[in-house]
């Protein structure tokens, strides 16, 4: 199969494994271009019976997906082009997670760097995640912007780690290191950084080499959580906080202070807390 011309993704296929490398400088924000590329790619791969496993990694060792593009506060209609075919009861950010969750292939995130906000939601929607000790980090920073997550985190993280730890993640709004994420169940394993890529590749190839029908049967047998009601509640909570004056002040203040630059994103939590 010939791949679509993606502007934010690099895609390769071999031995039943599709490797998708995210490449959207400077810090891999989830913007309109990346959203469109990911939606198209997942739809295309869902029809490709030669692919049994999809591995997502990043061209940037520091950042997997930084978060949703904060500059879109000035373009509130930017994602409207994706709303025509949304499943009932979900917004465009939730729909990306649902698309990933329902992918027929096994989906694996090779997390070598940081993923916050919509990036952490993408990670939580994948079937498996393996994270690099000392480098990987997960964070839901939305509370520091005066909002709650709107792309599935309230449901996905709760399903993975339980309500008490989910509230810690969502309201504590700290960057969670790989070892803690493993302890909480947010990721499958934390691995030494120099062993991560080889482990993920071996796991992906082993799964892809299973006899015909095994992957599909396992994914049918291990049920997905029904998040439909929870996603509606999350969307209502997100929209109700997003319209508050503090949200606009903090998002704009964050951008002015260096969010979405490499330096600012290294300690985004500290940057946002400094806005008061």
Image (cartoon, rainbow, N blue to C red):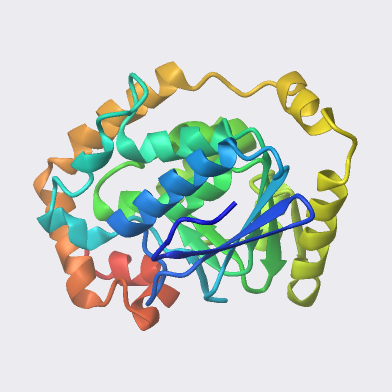
The residue at 21%/70% (across/down) is 255
Q: Is residue 184 above or below residue 273?
A: above
Q: Nearer the viewer, residue 79 or 112?
A: 79
Q: Quadrant of residue 31?
A: bottom left
Residue 165 visible: no
In this picture, residue 24 sits left or right of residue 128: left
* Residue 164 location (% of width, % of height): 56, 35
Q: Is residue 272 above or below residue 188?
A: below
In this picture, residue 142 sits left or right of residue 222: left
In this picture, residue 152 sits left or right of residue 276: right
The residue at 49%/22% (across/down) is 227
Q: Is residue 269 above or below residue 83?
A: below
* Residue 26 location (% of width, % of height): 37, 77
The residue at 26%/26% (across/down) is 236
Q: Nearer the viewer, residue 180 or 132?
A: 132
Find the residue positioned furthest to the front: 2
Residue 271 visible: yes
In this picture, residue 44 sits left or right of residue 219: left
Point out the image quarter for the C terminus.
bottom left
Number of on-image labels: 0
* Residue 208 location (% of width, % of height): 81, 46
Q: Quadrant of residue 125?
A: top right
* Residue 205 location (% of width, % of height): 83, 54
Find the residue positioned furthest to the bottom: 263
């Amino acid at each position: 199969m010939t791949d679509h011309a993606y502007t934010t993704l690099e895609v390769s296929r071999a031995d039943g494994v599709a490797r998708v490398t995210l490449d959207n400088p400077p810090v891999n924000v989830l913007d309109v271009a990346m959203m469109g590329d990911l939606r198209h790619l997942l739809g295309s791969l869902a029809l490709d019976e030669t692919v049994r496993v999809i591995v997502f990694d990043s061209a940037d060792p520091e950042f997997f997906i930084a978060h949703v593009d904060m500059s879109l506060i000035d373009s509130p209609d930017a994602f409207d082009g994706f709303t025509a075919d949304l499943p009932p009861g979900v917004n465009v950010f939730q729909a990306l997670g649902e698309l990933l969750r329902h992918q027929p292939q096994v989906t694996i995130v090779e997390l070598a760097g940081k993923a916050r906000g919509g990036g952490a939601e993408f990670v939580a929607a994948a079937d498996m995640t393996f994270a690099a000790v000392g480098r990987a980090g997960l964070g839901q920073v939305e509370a520091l912007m005066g909002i709650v997550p709107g792309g599935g985190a309230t449901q996905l993280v709760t399903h993975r780690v339980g309500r008490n730890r989910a509230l810690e993640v969502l309201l504590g709004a700290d960057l969670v290191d790989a070892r803690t994420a493993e302890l909480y169940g947010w990721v499958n394993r934390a691995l030494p950084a120099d062993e991560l890529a080889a482990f993920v590749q071996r796991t992906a190839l082993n799964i892809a080499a299973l006899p015909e029908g095994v992957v599909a049967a396992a994914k049918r047998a291990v049920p997905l959580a029904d998040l439909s009601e929870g996603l509606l509640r999350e969307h209502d909570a997100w929209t109700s906080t997003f319209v508050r004056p503090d949200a606009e002040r903090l998002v704009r203040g964050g951008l002015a202070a260096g969010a979405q630059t490499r330096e600012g994103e290294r300690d985004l939590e500290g940057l946002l807390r400094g806005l008061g």
